[in-house]
Image (cartoon, rainbow, N blue to C red):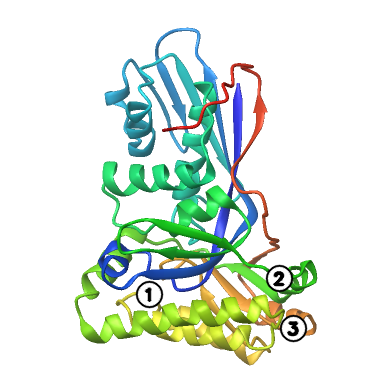
């Protein structure tokens, strides 16, 4: 049996610039971190030649093409695994519409586990690239590339998306004290709402032809460089203000990113002492995040009455194989 543990991610600034409609013209950038909430994928050899897949439903089929789950079906076809395998997934948090990149964490974890199952190694960079290829090109999802790389690499990163479709992942160079202080400044609450990422991102992508929207996105990308400079100077004083500016810009990128209920939650958090924040992910549901001094956390939590608070810390390692009982790992990189 193989078990892969893959972190979800929390994006701070620049989200949306990882869409091809933008970065192929302007180049994009995001600043994000992997977090200590995980997607677990178990892969095991099956006694017969059937495929058994368990997620929110269970599928048992005789051939790959009969699978309903598009990420699994396309991944197995890509790796030429025809049958005789069982795949089970478990997530720490709701895995649909959460805004934490759960579908991409699934793709990364699945590919990592399947490569290990085949006895092959794969680099983090290639893992991010291949997961993006599976979701965007093979499954046809209208999404960006940031989530796949964030889950594959782990840590607090500055991720750039180049016009030629290549991606650069640079670790933020700051002290551990800064990391700990940042973790202690973040509050995250579950809104209890989920939404369709695809529809929101599709509208954002279509809007990139609009010069006004493109200018807004350029401002958001510039904020990623500002945040990188602040963190690498170990200066957190203006982080909340920067997050607030990014959130106000993001709301203008497409209809439905926010609404009166979300605006009310956000205003309550700011009025209770947060210096900034944002709705995580594409918008309109999932998790809402605030940045605030620790002494303001109790007041903010009270202001968010009715929403479930979750504790988070940063994950530094990215996707990992935590169990490998096949003993067949070959020291070969994917070409």
Mark 3 vs mark 1: in front: 3
Residue at image coords 60%, 53%: 154
Q: Quadrant of the C terminus?
A: top left
* Tags 2 and 1 touching, CB below 8 Å: no
Disc number for residue 163: none
Counting from the top left corner in percent of width and height, residue 206 is at 21, 70
Mark found first going from the N terminus, 3 or 2: 2
Residue at image coords 50%, 47%: 105
Residue 16 shows in the view: no
Counting from the top left corner in percent of width and height, residue 166 is at 37, 56
Disc number for residue 174: 2
Disc number for residue 293: 3
Q: Which residue is more in the foreground, 332 or 234?
A: 332
Q: Going by the image, does 265 lie left or right of 21?
A: right
Mark found first going from the N terminus, 3 or 1: 1
Q: CA distance from mark 2 to mark 1?
A: 32 Å
Q: CA distance from mark 3 to mark 1?
A: 27 Å
Whether 138 is drawn above or below 73: the answer is below
Mark 2 vs mark 1: in front: 2
Residue 49 shows in the view: yes
Q: Going by the image, does 101 lie left or right of 164?
A: right
Q: Which residue is more in the foreground, 82 or 327?
A: 327
- Alpha-carbon neighbours of circle 2 within 10 Å: few (<14), some, or many (≥20)? some
Q: Secondary structure at mark 3?
A: loop
Whether 44 is drawn above or below 19: the answer is above
Mark 3 vs mark 2: in front: 2
């Amino acid at each position: 049996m193989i078990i892969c543990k893959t972190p979800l991610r929390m994006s701070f600034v620049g989200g949306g610039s990882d869409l091809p409609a933008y970065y192929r013209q302007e180049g994009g950038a995001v600043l994000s971190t992997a977090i200590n909430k995980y997607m677990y994928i178990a892969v095991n050899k099956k006694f017969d030649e059937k495929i058994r897949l368990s997620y929110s439903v269970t599928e048992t089929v005789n051939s790959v093409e009969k699978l309903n789950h598009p990420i699994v079906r396309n991944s197995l076809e890509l790796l030429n695994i025809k049958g005789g395998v069982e795949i089970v997934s478990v997530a720490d948090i709701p895995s649909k519409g959460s805004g934490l990149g759960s579908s991409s964490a699934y793709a990364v974890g699945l590919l990592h586990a399947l490569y290990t199952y085949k006895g092959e190694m794969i680099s983090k960079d290639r893992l991010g690239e291949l997961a993006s290829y599976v979701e965007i090109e093979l499954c046809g999802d209208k999404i960006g590339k940031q989530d796949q790389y964030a889950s594959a690499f782990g840590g607090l990163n500055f991720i750039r998306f180049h016009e030629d479709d290549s991606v650069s992942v640079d670790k933020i160079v700051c002290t551990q004290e800064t990391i700990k202080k940042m973790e202690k400044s973040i509050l995250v609450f579950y809104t209890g709402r989920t939404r369709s990422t695809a529809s929101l991102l599709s509208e954002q992508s279509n809007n990139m032809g609009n010069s006004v929207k493109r200018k807004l996105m350029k401002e958001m990308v510039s904020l990623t460089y500002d945040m990188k400079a602040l963190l690498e100077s170990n200066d957190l004083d203006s982080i909340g203000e920067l997050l607030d500016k990014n959130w106000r810009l993001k709301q203008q990128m497409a209809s439905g990113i926010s609404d009166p209920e979300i605006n009310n939650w956000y205003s309550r958090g700011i009025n209770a002492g947060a210096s900034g924040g944002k709705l995580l992910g594409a918008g309109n549901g999932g998790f809402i995040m605030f940045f605030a001094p620790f002494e303001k956390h109790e007041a903010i939590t009270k202001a968010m009455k009715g929403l479930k608070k979750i504790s988070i810390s940063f994950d530094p390692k990215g996707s990992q194989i935590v169990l490998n009982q096949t003993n067949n790992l070959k020291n070969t990189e994917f070409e």
